Image (cartoon, grey):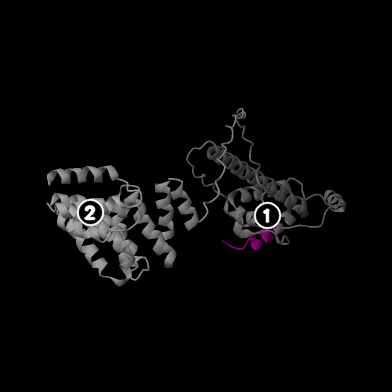
Amino acid sequence: MRPFGRLADRFSLKVRAVADSKDSIEKERVLDEPHEPRATAASDPDFDAAGLSDADRSLLRQAGESYRQGLHEPRAWHAFRSRRSRRRAGFRYSVLVAGAAAVAAFALLRQAGEPEVPLPAIAVAPELRARASLEETPAAPVPSVRTSPRAAPMESPPPVRSPPSRPPPSPATEGGCRARVEAGQFAAGRACFGQLAQRTGLEADVALLEQARLSIQHLSDVAGGLELLDRHRARFPESPLRGEAAELRVHALFALGRAPQALVESENLLGAPWARDLAPELHWLRGRIYEEELGDCARAANEYLALLGEPGGRGDQAELRRAQCLERIGRARDAEQAFRRYLDRDSPQSADLARAALERLDLGE
């Protein structure tokens, strides 16, 4: 396309030639009227020949016709520019309206929960693209969406009151554990000693042995007590309480009917120098095992012999059992002496049984 400046110059020359042929009086009247400064296509700095469209050329031709009908060149050029501006303003307004409508439709679709629909592409004339980037486009107002009436608030449920928190249990102590045992709470006492047994040192040593004793003597859990004694032996092999633990083991084996093993354990224990204080109890247990489990009164009488003269209930029962065993094995003279010795004790518990045995022995003679 040729530069529009040359076309504008030719247009000016033609317009001037037509103006010279007019009546000189009319020309002077028109030229003497006050008007704005001369404006031509050549002198307009905003005129862009590259952006001239077919519609602009049509307006330019109309401006030339208007001039030929009697207008002078500046007014014809001004009329061309005014029509061109109005045409562009109308097109720009239509673009803005279409954009606002698309934005409103997009907002309504988003609020209604429908899938998003891509906005249609809007064709923009080439001559408006450069100017639209330089001008600020006012944001289209988003139409308000009518919301549904607010539902009546639901009554909130009453708050759930949590139970008052219990204070943490106090740490177990040996005194507290023994207090439970003295109150007859043997299971609670065993559980308390179990907590102490998880510690170290002499406190754990004593607690583990007490657990075993309560299991065997009060809770009828002989097998569980024996397992605790095995654990005590493995954990505290040099315990100062190992004698008491060995004696309790013999009791557990006897209660479980494991007589041979109980005799072996007790025999080893009688030979230990640190178990001398346990000898009376061990002989008593061994005599009962021979008498009750094995039916061997001869050996039972020998075991009971170690308890002669011992005060208390165990010594009383040991002397009476010895005399009875001697009578069973046919040693009448030894049995008579044993019964008379028993009656010589202070307040014998089974004096009637001893007198009746003596009468039998006298009649037997």
Percent of width and height locating residue 304: 24, 57
Q: Earlier in the sequence, mark 2 or mark 1?
A: 1
Percent of width and height locating residue 124: 57, 50
Up-down: is 150 above or below 18? above
According to the image, label 2 marks what residue? Answer: 338
* Residue 128 among those drawn in magenta: no
Which mark is in front, 2 or 1? 2
Q: Which residues are magenta?
A: 1-11
Residue at 58% across, 50% down: 54
Percent of width and height locating residue 37: 81, 57
Residue at 23% across, 50% down: 339
The kind of secondary structure element at disc 2 is: helix
The span from disc 2 to disc 1 (Cα, nearest Å) is: 134 Å
For badge 1, the amino acid type reads Glu
In-image side of 160 versus 243 (left or right):
right
Quarter location, residue 273 = bottom left
Which sits in the foreground, 193 or 28?
193
Up-down: is 87 above or below 312? above
According to the image, label 1 marks what residue? Answer: 135
Asked whether the viewer can see residue 69, the reply is yes
